[in-house]
Amino acid sequence: MDNRSVKIKNLVKTYVDDRGRPTFTAVKDINLEINDGEFMVLVGPSGCGKSTTLRMVAGLEKITSGTIEIGDKVVNQVKPKDRGIAMVFQNYALYPHMTIYNNMAFGLKLAKKDKGFIQNSVSRAAKALGLEKMLDRKPQALSGGQRQRVALGRAIVREPKVFLFDEPLSNLDAKMRVQMRAEISRLHEQLDATMIYVTHDQIEAMTMGDRICVMRDGLIMQTADPLTLYRQPANVFVASFIGSPPMNLLRGTVQRGDGGLVFNEGAGPNSVKIPLRGEIATRAERYVDKPVYFGIRPEHLSNEAMDQMHVPLNSTVDIAEPMGSESLVYLQAGNGNMIARISGEHIFRHGDTANVYLNLSKAHLFDAETEEVIR
Amino acid sequence: MSVEIQTPSGEVKTTHPAADLPPAVEEADSTLPFLQWPAVGSLFLWMIVPLGMTIYFSFIRYNLMNPELTGFAKADNFKYLWEDPAFFPAILNTVILLGSVLVITVVVGVLLAVLYDHRFFGRNVATLLVIAPFFVMPTVSALVWKNMILHPVYGLIALALHSVGLPAIDWFGDHPMFSVILIVSWEWMPFAFLILFTSIKSLDLEQQEAASIDGATGMQMFFRITLPHLSRAIGVVVMIETIFLLSIFAEIYTTTSGGPGTATTNLAYLVYSLGLQQFDIGIASAGGLLAVILANVVAFFLVRLLSNNLKAAR
């Protein structure tokens, strides 16, 4: 079986204006390897260069410098149709004047494939996606979810080495999005193909990706599997981008107190002071009197102290959002707000003193200057 | 904003709230119809008075050279029109002029639209130049073509032909219809270009990208993506141009005066010739009535074609 990996080396994309002057660098020297059969998600806020990267892999965008290899072959100068890729677009990009059948068969027809072969592959793809009854219709007669399924079918019949998805679900309503998410994941299992998926939605990224590449401002912030991203974010950006509600981040300094190191949010009588124990204290050792971020996820604030790594936090309840099995509690702590995800059925009232504990073994410290995690 | 409706079959339908409201026009219709009467009435008069007069004139004896002779003429005016030696050439010329100009303007318009869809240096200025002929009055443009471009003595083409040692061509004498078609096409090409250019601008970029991934070459992209996308705009161009091209007059009057012989006499020019050169208002009215019927038949088919097109697209 041929190699379907994608290797991106020192990739740069600089846009130029009409007179050839550089205007904007969208992708700044990134390196990324996507393994054979892997589902790689590129995620980041808009303008981070994720779509540009994908479009360069597809061959729709010229590469300024660097190389892209698909299956050990440099494809910088190869036309899109010869790269062995198929792409699913955000706006479906179906051909409105063609029937669903012709939409899916278009690529094969242009490749002058045998008629029986075309019929065979289209009907197989249509069956897999539940589109058999719609083959004679035009795209206008279909709902958004069905249209995106046609776009998927058009990609499948090309039998590509690599599937490229450019925010394929962002035009669908919430319910359809969840359904299509599962469908694409199942498709990945069935076809066992390499897929690159661009999204700005971190939930999509977490639920679908084998690995996730978080980008910002044309740079890769971290590439890892979903759990690693969640557990060990490499920097403040990844920490705040992955997870919903986002990680609580407090800016302050590490200070040496009577009973060991303490994280101090800073001036003010109410500022948060957190005694550091165990592993996190060792990590903080080098940052005494230096500015750091203390980060902790809402789910690692609990209402009972399980062990001695749980330290109490002085706070009052601001707003609570009970959701049944758990509640999101917005706490007034120190100079700012923190969010806690408290499991169990509780009622919180505005102004109550909250009995919450921080699980220090799940907390992170970040260098406030470089925004990198302190290991 | 959209609303999700759960149907009994479990299917989710998304509808826009505005679509649920009854159309506002219907409501106004049922309550206060008489408020529309002035508008409808004035439009009706606007149309019916000239039409009624034309019909009336076409059935009476009415020759300005012989005003004594009046009275009901039965269908004689139509008979004389039919027997007029210029009648069939005029019909034929109308069709030739219409067809040629439509083909030329649409083909050139499409090609220019595709060209101008690409970025090139000075595109904005060039666009202005392409559109400019549309703003020149028909009489003026015909005179410019007649005296400055096609003239066998001091026309630009004669100059160009002389410079390579070829004899000048008397365009309006030897190729009268071709010359008229050339002038009218030059005038109407900007209109076709403008409509087609705006249409090509609305072609989804992702669609073109999807086609290029599917392996479409430039030609295949044009014939299988761009041209189908333009089909509705082409329909609009053909319809509107047809209505105007059926009544081309100024260009013929200023250049060839319908000649030589009847070589460039179209229906509109024939009506003018019958009424204001031969002073027979009766026969001219019969010709005018025929032109109205002809235009309506053409418009009927075109409107139906276009509305089917629009329905299919929805």
Image (cartoon, grey):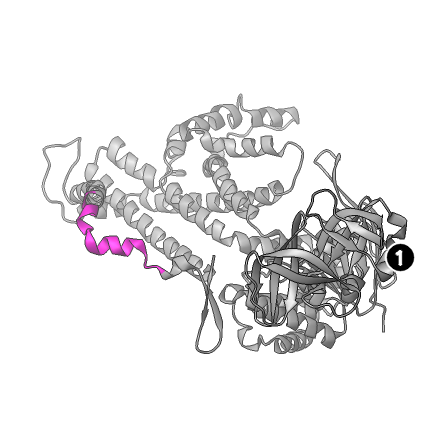
Q: Nearer the viewer, residue B200 or A238?
A: A238
Which residue is at a point 83% across and 66% down the rendered structure image?
A35
- Pinpoint residue B175: horizontal percent, then vertical percent: 49, 36
- State which quarter of the image contains the N terminus of chain A: bottom right
Q: Nearer the viewer, residue B153 or B238?
A: B238
Which residue is at a point 62% across and 42% down the rendered structure image?
B115
Which residue is at a point 42% across and 29% down the rendered structure image?
B137
- State which quarter of the image contains the C terminus of chain A: bottom right
What type is the residue that disc 1 sits on? Answer: Thr
Magenta residues (range):
B21-38
**Relative vertical location of residue B245 with respect to residue A170 in this rendering, above or below:** above
Q: Is residue B309 left or right of residue A302?
A: left
Q: Which residue is mark 1?
A: A282
Decide: few, some or many residues near mark 1? Use Cα within 10 Å; few <14, some 14-19, many ≥20. Answer: few
Q: Chain of mark 1?
A: A
Query: In the image, is residue B37 part of the stretch drawn in magenta?
Result: yes
Query: Looking at the image, which residue sits at the far top?
Result: B154
**Relative vertical location of residue A294 with respect to residue B155 in this rendering, above or below:** below
The reply to whether residue A275 is in sight is yes
Assign a secondary structure to mark 1.
helix
Quarter of image, res B69 = top left
Q: Is residue A369 left or right of residue B6?
A: right
